[in-house]
Structures are given as structure tokens and as C-alpha cells.
Amino acid sequence: MYAMASLWFESALLPQGWARDVRLTASDGRIERVQTGITPAAGDERHGIALPGLGNLHSHAFQRGLAGLTERRGREADSFWTWRELMYRFVERLDPEQLEALSAFAFIDMLEAGFTHVGEFHYLHHDRDGTPFADPGELASRVAAAAASTGIGLTLLPTLYAHGGFGGGAPAQRQRRFINDPEGFARIVEASRRAVAAVPFGHVGVAAHSLRAVTPEELAAVIRLADGGVIHLHIAEQLREVEECRQWCGASPVAWLLESAPVDERWCLVHATHATEGELHGIAARGAVVGLCPVTEANLGDGIFPAAAFLSARGRIGVGSDSNVRVDAAEELRTLEYSQRLAHRARNVLAAPGASTGRTLFDAALAGGRQALGQPATGLTAGAPLDVVTLAADQPQLLGRAQDQLLDSWIFCGGRELIDCVWRAGVKVVSGGCHRDRAAIEGRYARALRGLLA
């Protein structure tokens, strides 16, 4: 059931720019009409500042349970690869009910932080000993159930993980819960589509985990299963990955992909941290989105994506929370800009001369998230889902601000604590910064985590 909604805002960010005295009416979860310069009607719910909800284009929701547990240095230098071993150990204990509980907790965190739609990069498919479930969509259905219960929009991305290294290398024992062949993966994709049918405006895309996890023939099979939908994969996140790819085929991962695959607007290349200037221009020319996860990339020590060069080439970007070590839409955008300031030793690097950096980042993430998540319409416009985030206008960080200054202040001196209410598909799921079911979902999460860490 979709809710009817009639909302009025003192100020709202519309596709054509900021507007005053804005009234949105919606039914069946979609915006029917947008009026500006209008007084509120009786029965309208009234608020100060309205933004369209952002898409979180890359998440591994279960990793929310790992947050804070991998920050002790090992005997040797730590890296992404040592972190991955700790993540594998966590995965070995996770059962379906715990996966659903951890996913639901991550999803309410996202809604409270300004994300209204998530791309769940789902590569955990089998039971704890690696045995396939009788229902190939058992774990996909748990993710979909978590999304439906929390109210977040979902693009589920069932992911093929077939090998442990480039050229079809044998998988490691600890990867047994991920591993499939194309035939088994096709069954998971079909089951995922059934599972997501219950999520309002839900979508299913496909993903290959990475070029080290599939052969060229298996990647082609993934692309065929997309059936016109979005296609995601991790790429060029780590220098070791780039070097191992060169040893396999004589080219970097991005160069190989652009040469060998039909990369276009349907694709989201996650991270692409170590792409060269020429490769960035190639991605931009194809219209693909680069999925940036600045908080996770910083946490894992991946490196700094050359965002200034990519945006100068008219490249498209979006942001994701990836490992969910921190969940905050504003923080992802702030970390992206700050990484560029550190790299270039300059300020306001990603904005054009005279432009607001916050607005530049927000607009890019909104458009890139829509494209990468397969949403045909987004923003506060007729026909789009009613996905709205309001900021608490009475908070000190926002006093005396107007229009783009609101975005600059939310992103650079605020964060999730400034979010007041959130509607997803016309349903109010967050009030006063708190999800409607936080207590119950947090309790379930606590029980699941205690069982995992016992």
C-alpha cells in the first residue's frame, strides 16, 4: 500500500533550482504535482528545507556489523588484503536471519543519513559450509525483506564470483560462500527478481564481482543476464589488482574492460581508483558512472580517485557507503572533496569557478546515483517517486543560510545530525532524525551481532 501525501516546504531544491513555498502532492508513491510560490493548504504537512533523497550506489550491508572491529594493526603492515581476511572470517559465521538483521540496521542508518535508495552489491549466496541453499534466492530474499521492512528503495545486484584470481584462478576456501558458475548464478538472478517484486519501485541489476573473479566468458554471461538493466563491478581499487591484471593480460583492468566489453550508460565501475588519465576519458566517453565510496576508500587505504580530472572530462559519478563503516551521505561527499584538496593542495577543487562545491557534489551524486541504480526518474519532479529529505532548519549550522549555502553547510559543517524527516515512495520513514522502527530493528541487530561475536 502506498500512502497519499501532501507536503509544503519553505524552500526546496527542484530540478530547475531552488524554489520558495513549494507544495508536493503524491499518490501511489509518486509525485503528481509540484507547485511553487503557493501558500500551504489545510492538511499539508509543513517543513522548512527539502532535498531529493540521494541514491547509495554501492553497499555491502552485512559489513555494517564489522564497523570498528578491524582497526587494530597487525604484526605487519595492514592493507585492503588483510582487512579482507577479517571480513571473510566474519562471513563464515553469518546465517540468513543474521544477514537480514544486519541489512535492516544498515538500511535504517542509510535512511536517517539522507540515502533513500540503495544498490546492494550482493555476493553472499550460499550456506556457511558453501552448500547452495535449496532456494537459490534465500539470501537475496533476506536482503529484499530488510529493504521492504525498512522502507528503503532497493536495486539488488546479484553478483557473480567464480574465481580467486585473474585468468580463472582457484578460489580460496574462505570464498566458498560466494562461488558460482554462470548456470547457478542465472538461477540466483531469477530468484532475486522474484524477491524484489515486493519492494516499492525495486529493481534488479547484475554484477560481476571484479575482473579477478570472472573469466571473460563469464563476464559475457553476466552481461547477457542484465536484460537491459544496470551492470556493476569493482575495478582498479588496489594497485596489486592492477599489477596482477597486467601480468594476466598485459593491460590494466580498466583498459581491458573498455577494449573487451560493451561498457555504456548501464555500467557502474566501482572505485576505479587507479585509472589513468586516458582511461578516465574512455569511461567518460562511454557514459558509464564511476561509483565512489570515499569513506570506505579512505578506511581501507585504497588511494585517491582523480575526481578533478574525471569531472573535467565530463565524467559521471555517484557515491556509496560500501563497507558501511560510517553511513552518512554528507560525509561521503565531504570526504570526496577533501581528498581532492589534500591531493591538489587547493580548496573547492571539484566546483567550477564561482559555483557552490556542495551543490556541485550533490547534483553529481543525485544524477549518477539515479543512472547507476536504474531509476528512470528522480528528484522533486512529477512522475518521480516521492523521496524527500528535510533538513532541520533551526540547527545552528544552518542558521542564516539560503539555497546552495544550505548544501554547503550540511555537507561541510554538518552531516546526518541535520536530517529531520525522510519520505520514501510517499511514506514517512524518518521523523526527528529517527527511523520509525529503530528500536525494534536495533534490538534485532544487537541480538544478531552478539551471536556472531560470541
Image (spheres, rainbow, N blue to C red):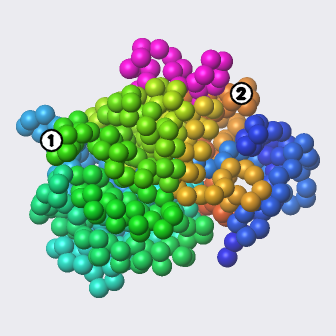
In the image, residue 267 sits, relative to residue 62, either above or below, namely above
Identify the residue shown where x is 39% and y is 30%: 278
Q: How crowded is mark 2: few (under 14 residues within 10 Å), some or many (20 or more)?
A: few
Look at 91% across and 46% down and name the residue there.
Answer: 38
Residue type at mark 1: give it.
Gln
**Between 345 and 442, the one nearer to me in the picture:** 345
| Residue at image point 37% right, 44% down | 258
Crowd around label 1: few <14 · some 14–19 · many ≥20 (10 Å): few
Contact, CB < 8 Å: mark 2 with mark 1?
no
Report the front residue among 102 and 212.
Answer: 212
Q: Quadrant of residue 326 in the image?
A: top left
Whether residue 287 sits left or right of residue 5 in the image: it is: left
On whether residue 407 falls in the magenta region, the answer is no
Over which residues does the magenta segment extend?
339-358
Q: How far apart are marks 2 and 1 (CA)?
A: 54 Å
Q: In the image, residue 207 lies at what x, y percent?
A: 38, 59
Looking at the rendering, in which quadrant would you find the N terminus? bottom right
Does residue 438 appear anywhere in the picture?
Answer: no
State the residue in front, 342 or 351: 351
* SS type, badge 1: helix
Residue on which disc 1 sits: 247
- Residue 344 lies in the magenta stretch: yes
Residue 443 left/right relative to 200 = left
Q: In this view, does 446 lie above or below 292?
A: below
Helix, strand or loop for the magenta stretch, by majority: loop
Q: x, y percentage for residue 45?
A: 79, 55
Counting from the top left corner in percent of width and height, residue 340 is at: 43, 24
Q: Name, please, the residue furthest toward the bottom.
A: 134
Residue that mark 2 sits on? 401
Kindly give the residue lying farthest to the top in the view shown. Answer: 345
Residue nearer the viewer, 63 or 46: 63
